[in-house]
Image: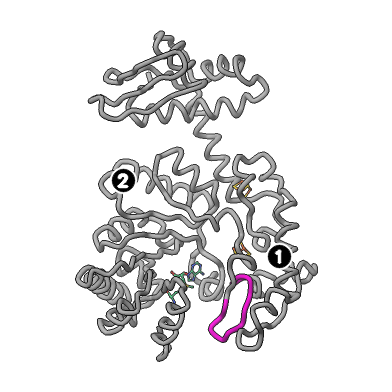
Amino acid sequence: MCRPDIFSIIDFAKRQGLEVTINTNAINLTEHVVEKLIGLNVDQVCVSLDGATPEVNDAVRGHGTFNKILTNLNKLVRLIKEKKSPMTTGLAFTMLRMNMHQLTDMFKLAVEIGVDAIDFMELYVSGNAYDNLDKYEFQYTREEAIYSLEMFAQYLRKNRGKFRRITVQLDSHVSLAKYLNRRYGAGIFFHGRNMDCRAGDEMWYMQADGILSPCGICNNPLYNMKVLRNGCYILERIKITEASLQNVEDSNYFRSFLEFKKKSKEKLRKSCTNCEHNNYCAPCPILHYDDEVIEECEAVRNRIKEFVSEMLTRKPQIAGDARWRASDEQIEVWDKSWTTWRKVEGMGVDIIKNILLQNENKTIKEIANMICMNYSPAKKDAVEEDVAYFMWDLYLAGYVKFV
Ligand SMILES: C[S@@+](CC[C@H](N)C(=O)[O-])C[C@H]1O[C@@H](n2cnc3c(N)ncnc32)[C@H](O)[C@@H]1O
Ligand code: SF4
Ligand code: SF4
């Protein structure tokens, strides 16, 4: 947004049929700029905000930026409405130790402003974050992140119905996003790129000076030292104005990177071997080059273990106002007013018909043992986890209570 020719670049890109999205700090989003962006049919504008209050945001983004960002963002949302533009808007929030307590407040602020999406992003230790790592405590521990996100997910579960229109996105490991959705029904969206690297084939990255790379970290010495030293791929300086698209595809850099990526995907890490997500997930080949265990996913696994072992001691019973309609193969579980329902099949039918509806006073562990004998004796842990989640789901929906 500092370039005087930005509008010609956007215009050119749009005329090529490209989708144009802009990530900006919003400082330059004057009324004139916003009107131009709307006129050029920019598809999305995403604004960075790193705190829900001036104190927190301004400590990261600079003094006075909170008010400026909010003024400009409100203006953007207002003009989009006035001009009936299809442009969408988003807020980008980079999670840091100093703002992790504001996840819910950030969400409320995003709803209040009226943006279409809010994106919670993980910190990359680069740029100012790298230079100031010792000065400020930017980096949170895995446990801190999970705890804060769980608090936020609980808020979402209770209030999500009121705010269906806004997309909540988490740019983190797939295991974490899936856990939050399964455990809390948080309805968090996570992008395909969190599971499968797109660099070099579906995505190319161009720096402001025209230098091309598969992605922004492939040519960043903060991250690539070790992989380059081990000859995993070959770095080249390719400038967009000096190479044809074919040259780029055929370059040693792009070809060797794609080969490295393929090999990394084939080499399953220890923590991925038994992971339920491993058929569609592949951790970053560069950031996790050395890792046998993906620390982030291990922290989630530990959290799931804690949850399951706590659930196993509980005794579920049918809640007073739950409604059921049972046939041999399936059960319909209705809400109090008989308006919404869900279908339960397979082992769930057994649990409900033979245990819960018979009023048997069993712990979830005992129920899981019975199911395990009938279905898959060899998979005790997996069955315990499944039954615990199944009961938790029914509990959240108000169909069972724990005594
Ligand atoms: C490439 S950027 C920057 C766009 C714009 N210049 C700005 O400052 O907001 C896109 C997003 O990455 C975020 N970001 C910047 N540094 C980051 C870091 N070290 N780790 C994670 N996200 C970061 C920004 O907050 C922004 O929302
Ligand atoms: S453990 Fe591996 S496969 Fe599972 S979510 Fe994490 S990175 Fe993906
Ligand atoms: S190399 Fe890593 S950071 Fe780059 S796009 Fe792939 S997964 Fe993302």
Q: Given the image, on which type of amino acid does mark 1 rest?
A: Leu
Quarter of the figure with residue 32 = bottom left
Magenta residues, as a range? 206-217
Q: Single out the mark in the foreground, 1 or 2.
A: 1
Q: Residue at x 23, y 68 (%)?
A: 84
Q: Position of residue 7 (x, y in %)?
A: 39, 85
Which residue occupies the foreground of this view, 254 or 381? 254
Q: Please state if 46 lies on the left or on the right of 267 as rendered.
A: left
Q: Is residue 302 above or below residue 196?
A: above
Q: Please rate how many residues cluster around mark 1, counting C-alpha atoms within 10 Å: few if below 14, some from 14 to 19, many from 20.
A: some
Total of numbered circles in the picture? 2
Q: Please state if 333 lies on the left or on the right of 348 as rendered.
A: left
Q: Please rate how many residues cluster around mark 2, counting C-alpha atoms within 10 Å: few if below 14, some from 14 to 19, many from 20.
A: some
Q: Position of residue 156 (x, y in %)?
A: 34, 46
Quarter of the figure with residue 6 = bottom left
| Residue 34 part of the magenta segment | no
Residue under numbered circle 1: 258
Residue under numbered circle 2: 160
Residues at marks 1 and 2, CA–CA distance in whole angstroms = 40 Å
